């Protein structure tokens, strides 16, 4: 990937997380970057192509972060807690998850991007489900239902916190993140946590 292409993806991702897919244009990206829209079209022929590239980029980043954490953290519970805490840092400025942002604009997305988003959403649930299952298999974490459903529920609550935090503020965000991520962190008294 060229440096310019990476810069475009970075700016587009920031706009996606703060405004949503339907609310930013090539003109907005060009203005932030100080380049022409023709330069954007050189790298991404259409906004749909940019959206597809953003989905690929998001999946690559999530994969890389989860892999890095798996090598640094002592177990899968810690991997999940660190993974969720890492993304929550971006909420401080009112941004939301890029996948949730695309999901909220679903009706405005071209069919190919809707399909890619569905695949990305399944990927994200699967990524979280794998770590939840490994944590449950390792003991110390009891799942209340099927792993993929638990992963989807966890992600829905987590992303809901980002939306509510825009209105309720940082104190709400920290309290709710503690409630969601807390059960994933190592228990204080060697007892099982239930998610």
Image: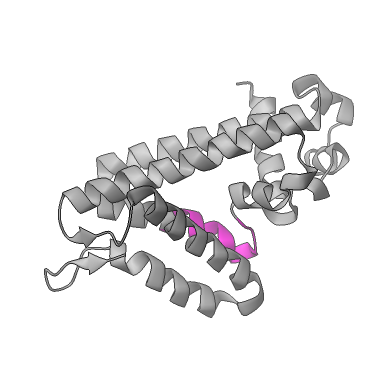
Q: What main secondary structure does the magenta stretch of the protein show?
A: helix
Q: Give how far across and how far down residue 173 sits, in percent.
A: 52, 72
Quarter holding residue 77: bottom left
In depth, the one of 105 and 19 nearer the eye is: 105
Q: Is residue 153 left or right of residue 112?
A: left
Check residue 153 for magenta coloring.
Answer: no
Residue ID at (69%, 33%): 113
Residue ID at (62%, 48%): 98
Q: Quadrant of the N terminus?
A: top right
Q: Can residue 147 be seen?
A: yes
Looking at the image, residue 99 lies above or below residue 143:
above
Which segment is the magenta one? 85-96
For the view shown, which residue lies furthest in the front direction?
145
Q: Is residue 169 left or right of residue 111?
A: left
* Count of picture labels: 0
Q: Give how far across and how far down residue 39 sits, in percent.
A: 83, 25
In depth, the one of 52 and 64 nearer the eye is: 52
In depth, the one of 34 and 68 nearer the eye is: 68
Quarter holding residue 177: bottom left
Q: Give how far across and how far down residue 33 sits, in percent.
A: 78, 39
Quarter holding residue 65: top left
Residue ID at (21%, 63%): 186
In depth, the one of 112 and 176 nearer the eye is: 112
Q: Give how far across and how far down residue 132 sits, in percent.
A: 30, 50
């Amino acid at each position: 990937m060229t440096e310019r292409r990476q810069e475009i993806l970075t700016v587009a991702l920031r706009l996606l997380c703060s405004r949503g897919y339907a609310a930013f244009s090539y003109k907005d990206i060009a203005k932030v970057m100080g380049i022409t829209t023709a330069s954007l079209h050189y790298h991404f022929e259409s906004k749909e192509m940019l959206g597809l590239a953003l989905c690929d980029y998001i999946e690559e980043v999530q994969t890389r972060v989860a892999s890095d954490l798996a090598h640094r953290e002592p177990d899968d519970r810690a991997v999940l807690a660190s993974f969720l805490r890492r993304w929550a840092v971006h909420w401080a400025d009112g941004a939301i998850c890029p996948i949730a942002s695309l999901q909220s604009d679903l009706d405005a997305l071209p069919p190919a991007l809707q399909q890619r988003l569905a695949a990305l959403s399944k990927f994200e649930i699967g990524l979280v489900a794998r770590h939840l299952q490994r944590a449950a298999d390792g003991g110390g974490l009891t799942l209340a239902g099927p792993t993929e459903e638990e992963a989807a529920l966890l992600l829905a609550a987590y992303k809901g916190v980002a939306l509510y935090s825009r209105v309720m503020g940082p104190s709400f965000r920290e309290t709710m993140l503690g409630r969601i991520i807390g059960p994933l962190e190592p228990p204080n008294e060697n007892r099982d946590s239930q998610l």
